[in-house]
Amino acid sequence: MDTISVYVSPWRRAWLFVILGLVLSFLVAPVLIVIPMSFSASNYLQFPPEEWSWRWYQSFFSSVEWLAATRNSILAACLTTVVATPVGVLAAVALSRARGFTSQMAQAVFLLPQVVPVIIIGIGVFFLYIRLGLVNTMAGIVLAHAALAIPFVVITTLSGLKNFDINQSNAAQSLGAHPIRAFFDVTLPQIRLSIIAGALFSFITSLDEVVISLFIAGGDNTLLTRRMFLSLRDQLDPTIAAISSILIALSIIGVVLFLIFSKHRDS
Amino acid sequence: MRYALNHAVLAATQRREQRSSLYAMMPGLLLVALVIGPSLWLAFLSFYANGQPSLEHYQRILDNPSYTSIMLNTLHLSVVVTVIVVLLGYPTTYAITLLPKRGSAVALACVAIPFWTSLLVRTYAWMVILQRNGVLNGWMLDLGLIERPVRMANSFLGTTIGMVHIMLPFFIFPLYAILRSIDPNLVRAAYSLGASPSRAFIDVFLPLSRQGVMAGGLLTFVLCLGFYVTPQLLGGGNVTTISMKIEQNITAYSDWGAASALAVVLIVVVGLILLVSRWLTTRGAAWR
C-alpha cells in the first residue's frame, strides 16, 4: 500500500500520543473509579476503599423503593423498545422508498426529537399529559420515550437499507409475493443487524432518560434515573455508587459483546 | 402501444407506492407529533398573557437582569466546553487514525465505554471525584500540589469538566469517520512534493477535515445549550442554565408563560445554529 512511504519519527508525534493517552484516561477513569468505590465500607466513598464491603449493594437490594424504581425502568425500557422498533422500521422503509419534498420533510420531522432540547420536550409533554391525565402513568412514559427513541431506529435502519438492493424486494413482489411478505422474507433478514442496533438504542434511550421522566414519571411509576437524580440533588448517597457500578458493568459488557459481534460479522 | 400501457401501469404503481409509504410513516409521525406538538402549542401561548396577545413574557426576559445573566452564563459555559472539546478531541481522533488496527479498536472502545454509560452515572462519578473530600483533592493533597482542598464540585469548573467528559465521544466518533475517509494519498503527494510533515498536515489534511470539525463543533455547542442534568448536579446552585430556569419556572412557580418564552428563545437559537451548520456543510459539498 505504502507506495511513497515517508518516515515520520514516532518521537515527532510523541506529544500527539501523550494527548491521546491523557484524553482516553480522562474518559475511562471516572467511569471505572466508581466500581471499587462502591465496595467501600465507610459512610462516605473512598478510593481506594480502606475496608471492603457489600453494604451499599445490600442497601440497594433491600430497599423496596429502589427495587420498584428499577423494575419500572426495565419495564419502561422494554415497552419503549417494543413500541419504537416496529414503528421506526416501518417509517425507515417508507422513507427509503419515498421521493420528493414530502419525504424530505418527513425525514426532518423524524429527527426533531433529537434536535429539540429535551427540557422543551419535557415541559411540552407535561403540559399535554396534565390535560390527558397521563402524568405518572406507564403509558405516558412509554409514549414519550418511544418518540425519543424513534430517530435512532430510523437512522440505523436507513443506514442498513442503504446496503440493501431494493430490486430484490421488487423481484419478490413481481413473483407474486405480497409487499408485506416480501419485507419479512427478503428485506428483513438482510437488515436484521441494523434493526437490532436500533432496538438496543431504544432500550438505552429509555433507561437513561432523566429530564422528561422528572416531569411525568412520579408516584408509583417513578423510574430509576429519576429517583437517582432527585436523591443526588440532596446528598451523595453511596447506594447510588452501587447502582451506578451495576449500570457501568452492563454497558461495558454491552460494548465488549458489540465488539465481538461486529468482529464475527467482518470475518 | 404496449410500451405506453406499461408506462402508465408503472406510474400508477409508483403513485400507489408513494401513498402507501406515507401511511407507513403515520404511526411514527403521530408519536413524534405527540412530543413536539405540545411544545408548539406552548410556543404559541407564550405570546399571550391573561388571555390577550402580548409580549409581556418576552419583555420580562429582557427587563429582568437575572434572565440576561442566565443566558450569558449558558452561552459562556457552552462556548468554553465546545472549545475544550474541539481542542482535545481533534488531536485525540487524529492520533487514533494513526494507530495500528488493534490499537485503534482499543482506543475506540475506550471512547465507547463512557458513551454507552448513562449520563447520570457519569455526572455522579464526577461528583464523587471532584467533591471536597473526594479522590482528586486527596491525590493533590498527597502530592503536595495544594495545601487545602480546592472547590471543584458545585462550581463552573466542575460543570465544565463533567460536560467535556460527556460531549467528547459525541465529537470524536463522527470526526473519526471523517478523518478516516480522507485519502491518505493526498498527504503522501504533499510529502513527495517536498512538504514537511507539519506543512502537509496544515495545508492538506487540516483543510480537508475542516468541515467535519465545524459540524461536530456546532453540534457540541447546540447540545451544550440545552444541558440540564450535569449543570444541575455539578453546578450545585452556582451555575444556572436556560434549561434549569425553564424547569424551575414550571416546578417551583408553575409559570408556564415565562418557561415557554425561555423555551422559544432557546429553540430559536438552536434552530439558527443548526441552519448555519447545514448551510456550511451543503456549501462545502458544492465546492468539491
Image: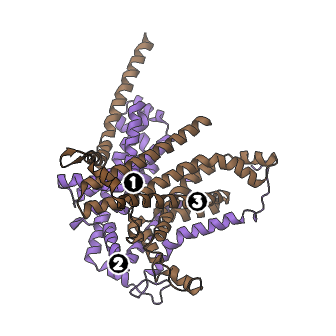
Chain colours: A purple, B brown
- Which residue is located at x 57 percent, y 48 percent? B212
Query: Is residue B20 left or right of B142 when viewed as pictured?
Result: left
Q: Nearer the viewer, mark 1 or mark 2?
A: 2
Query: Is residue B176 left or right of A101 when viewed as pictured?
Result: right
User: In which quadrant of the rendered image does the N terminus of chain B lie?
Assistant: top left
Q: Rounded to the nearest whole Å, what is the CA distance between mark 2 and mark 3?
A: 33 Å
Q: Crowding near pointer 3: few (<14 within 10 Å), some, many (20+)?
A: many
- Which residue is located at x 44 percent, y 53 percent? A197
- The chain under label 2 reads A
Badges 1 and 2, same chain = yes
User: In which quadrant of the rendered image does the C terminus of chain B lie?
Assistant: top right
Name the one closer to the observer, B259 or B104. B259
Residue lying at the far front in this picture: please name it: B63
Question: Residue B282's x, y, as percent?
Answer: 53, 38
Badges 1 and 3, same chain = no
Name the one closer to the observer, A77 or B64. B64
Amino acid type of the residue tagged 2 in the rendering = Gln
Q: Are dots 1 and 2 in contact, CB under 8 Å?
A: no
Residue A190 visible at all: no
Q: Rounded to the nearest whole Å, what is the CA distance between mark 1 and mark 2?
A: 34 Å
Q: Rounded to the nearest whole Å, what is the CA distance between mark 1 and mark 3?
A: 29 Å
Q: Crowding near pointer 2: few (<14 within 10 Å), some, many (20+)?
A: few
Amino acid type of the residue tagged 3 in the rendering = Gly
- Which residue is located at x 44 percent, y 87 percent? A52
Secondary structure type for disc 3: helix
Q: Kindly identify which residue carries mark 2.
A: A235
Q: Kindly identify which residue carries mark 3.
A: B89
Q: Crowding near pointer 1: few (<14 within 10 Å), some, many (20+)?
A: many
Question: Residue B233's x, y, as percent?
Answer: 39, 70
Question: Residue A135's x, y, as percent?
Answer: 21, 58
Q: Residue A199 — which label?
A: 1
